[in-house]
Image: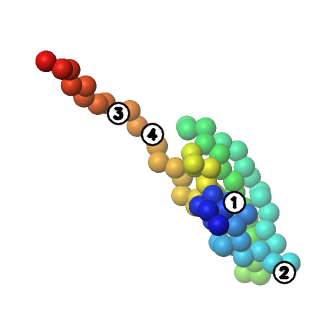
Amino acid sequence: MDSVDRSSLRLLIEKWLGPTPATPVRVSRFGRIPSSRRRYVYVEALLPAGALAIYFFLHDDGTWCVFPPAVERPAMSVLRLAA
């Protein structure tokens, strides 16, 4: 199993929310973060004690995580010219 398989959205939902026939899960929202245009999915589990919800974020390498990707910041570098 490679890293993409371990971080697939389906496997992360199973890991974090443990859906069963008695405690179903549903995607209640999805879209893009306005500032970065990165994708997210909001998943809810219907537990006997109430709803439990988690946001999942798509990263540049194609993996899904429970934390958002790092914001790309402008960077400068130095170019050394030959003498």
Residue under the image location 38 percent in, 32 percent down: 74
Compute the Cα span from label 1 to label 2. 21 Å
Q: Which residue is mark 4?
A: 72
**Residue under the point 69% across and 53% down:** 41
Give the CA distance from mark 3 to mark 4.
Answer: 9 Å
Q: Disc 1 or 4, which lies upstream in sequence?
A: 1
Q: Are marks 1 and 3 in contact (CB under 8 Å)?
A: no
Type of amino acid at the residue the image marks with label 1:
Leu
Q: Give amino acid for label 2.
A: Ala
Where residue 55 appears, as percent x and y from the top left, is 63, 58
Q: Position of residue 35 (x, y in %)?
A: 55, 37
Residue 50 is at least partly visible in this image: no
Q: CA distance from mark 2 to mark 4?
A: 41 Å
Query: Nearer the observer, disc 2 or disc 4?
Result: 4
Q: Quadrant of residue 73?
A: top left
- In the picture, the disc for residue 22 is 2
The one nearer the camera, 46 or 76, is: 76
Residue assigned mark 3 = 75
Residue occupying the point 75% across, 77% down = 47
The amino acid sitting under disc 3 is Ala
Residue 36 position in % (x across, y down): 55, 38
